[in-house]
Amino acid sequence: MQHGNSTAPYRHQPGLFSSFFQGSFACSTACRTPGKRADLTISSGHDTLLDKDYALLASHQILTARDGARWYLIEKQPGEYHWESFLPQLKAAKAHGIEMIWELAHFGWPDGLDIWGEEFVERFSAWARAFACLMRDEGYTRPFITPMNQISFWSWAGAEIAWFNPFVTGRGRELKRQLTRASIAAMRAMREVLPGVRFVLTDPLVNVAASGYSTAARQEAQLLHQAQFEVWDWLAGRSEPELGGSEDLLDIIGLTWYPDNQWFHNGDPLEPHHPDYRPLNLLLQEIGQRYQRPLMIAETGAEADRCAQWIAQVCQEVSLALDAGVQIEGVSIYPLVDYPAWDDDRRYPAGLFGLPDANGNRTVNESIALTLRSQQIKRKQQPVRTSTA
């Protein structure tokens, strides 16, 4: 990140993706109560509006997007893959020139499969290989893939507080290890089919501060803060080597970033006015130095009238990190389209585009769209700094 003898870094010039500003579709297939699956691709209307939705992206100069291949629909019977739900996505994205980052498991898995067993790892690896074969057969040699979306968050929400599947408590670390093992097996299987595949490895970027000044409080806060790095360290084989990780598997690091990603170790929110609140650009510099890998903001957004201002703030912080030489390759707005919230059916009014009307048309959130356009223009006007001498 430094150059020559200069103490000032180059500003990184992103170029990994088709567009720096990106979007993420809500594509979770989690069960929010046992037996009740919430497929957000359906509830947002995206499944029937693929062509219109991808056309909207292109019209707003968003040429890279994250979306999900829904495992539970594609492999209803073990080892049998039916692509009817996915091929229209692939076709529509290609028709509108949208470069995709495909997720293979966004908090959901096929009915009847025990997430705790060895079969889960084997089935996920085989599913990933089948997906890679399909992409190869469709002419894609360097697709972007997220094997497991947000392993750390999934493990906490599903196996520490039983917020969604698998609905248990006190087994978060066990699930984190299981999902990491499955991801590693899947990545190796995909590489055998598509050596050029790129992996976007997503998890939350957080800051945890001590709520008191005691040594115990500071130590606990530090442990909680460091836990955010565990999955990436495991995937790289830097710790827990028995899981099978290695440095070559640690590829693009995808960071999810929301207004509530900073808190005290006792769970209280850490507000921006507090001295322990850390600017995003410093957190990005920390993770950039730790891993020396390409980074992207894989999800960011806020509800209602906060969203436009939040995105502008994130972009300002990302610009500062780029000035510091951090290799940030994109910022992805989440959600692209509104949806009834998967945990309580409440509408989530944060998308760039609204829920469809009776004619299948989505309204545009003009404040977010104007902020996006302003940031796109700023990026085009940003001078290329190739020397700090």
Image (spheres, grey):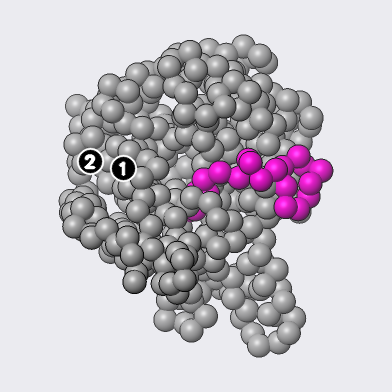
Instruction: Inspect the magenta stretch and tell me whether residue 252 lies in it.
Output: yes
123 vs 302: above or below: above
139 vs 60: above or below: above
Q: Residues within 10 Å of mark 2 (few under 14, many from 20)?
A: some
In the picture, measured across the screen, residue 136 lies left or right of residue 80, that is left
- CB-based contact (under 8 Å), mark 2 and mark 1: yes
Residue at point 61% right, 81% down? 211
Q: Earlier in the sequence, mark 2 or mark 1?
A: 1
Circle number at residue 293: none
Nearest the viewer among 328 and 332 is: 328
Circle number at residue 19: 1
Q: Would residue 26 be seen by someone viewing this image from the given angle?
A: yes
In the picture, measured across the screen, residue 34 lies left or right of residue 320, that is right
- Displayed quadrant of residue 281: bottom left
Q: Would residue 169 be seen by someone viewing this image from the given angle?
A: no
In the picture, measured across the screen, residue 131 lies left or right of residue 59, that is right
Circle number at residue 61: 2
Residue 265 horizontal/vertical position (percent): 63, 72
Q: What is the magenta range?
A: 237-256
Q: Residues within 10 Å of mark 1 (few under 14, many from 20)?
A: many
Instruction: Inspect the magenta stretch and tell me whether residue 294 lies in it.
Output: no
Residue at point 40% right, 42% down? 16
Residue 177 horizontal/vertical position (percent): 74, 45
